[in-house]
Structures are given as C-alpha cells and as structure tokens.
Amino acid sequence: MSDNNQNNEVTPEQFRAARSLLGLDVRQICDEIGISTASLRRAERDEQIKPSTKIIVLLTLFYEQRGIEFLFEDGVGVRRQA
C-alpha cells in the first residue's frame, strides 16, 4: 500500500482500525447492517477479490454515524470525531 491514498478510498487497514476503535466484533457489525461476515472480512483484507461498492458505502456510513472519521491527508488513518 502506498503512503498516499489520493482517491480518498477507505482502505482495509482503516476499516479494521475503525472496528477496533469502536470495540465491535465482526458479527455485531454484520448483524447491524445486514452483510455477511465474508463481505466484512473481504473489506478488511487487502485481497485480489474486492468488496462491492455497496459494501464499502454501508461500512463507511456505519462507522461515520458512530463518530469515526477516515483520514486521508499525510497518509491514511482513522480517529474518533471530537
């Protein structure tokens, strides 16, 4: 992965970090937004088979609604919104 994500696409590392910040497990998120565990795991791994745009949008909105901010300047990261 490059240090600069110019497309502002949430990375697998950011999804994992967001889940960790909220202290949620895979099943809790999947049950809440109605996706399979395989879909979430695919979004959290940097693999050849990418998750669908719908899954990326659902996950991004889920985390943002819970106060997670995805960062794209000076590399990528996540933080809780103040």
Image: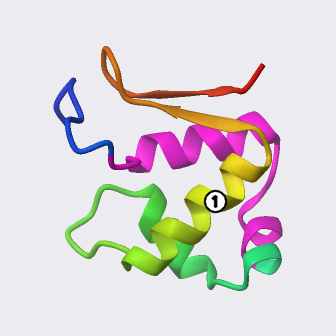
| Predominant SS of the magenta segment | helix
Which residue is nearer to you in this view: 6 or 37?
A: 6
Give the image quarter of residue 67: top right
Q: Position of residue 26 (x, y in %)?
A: 71, 64
Which residue is nearer to you in this view: 70 or 23?
A: 70
Q: Position of residue 12 (x, y in %)?
A: 41, 50
Which segment did they paint magenta? Answer: 9-30
Answer left or right for 74 relative to 30: left
Which residue is nearer to you in this view: 20 or 74?
A: 74
> Secondary structure under badge 1?
helix
The structure residue drawn at horizontal position 23% and vertical position 44%, both measured from the top left corner, is 7
How packed mark 1 is, by other alpha carbons closer than 10 Å (few <14, some 14-19, many 20 or more), is some
Say which quadrant the N terminus sits in. Answer: top left
Q: Position of residue 19 (x, y in %)?
A: 68, 47
Which residue is nearer to you in this view: 12 or 57?
A: 57
Answer left or right for 52 relative to 54: left
Answer left or right for 18 relative to 27: left
The structure residue drawn at horizontal position 78% and vertical position 19%, both measured from the top left corner, is 82
In the rendered view, tell whether residue 1 sits above or below residue 27: above
Answer left or right for 8 relative to 25: left
The structure residue drawn at horizontal position 49% and vertical position 40%, both measured from the top left corner, is 14
Residue behind mark 1: 61
In magenta stretch: residue 16: yes
In magenta stretch: residue 57: no
Q: How many marks?
A: 1
Give the image quarter of residue 21: top right
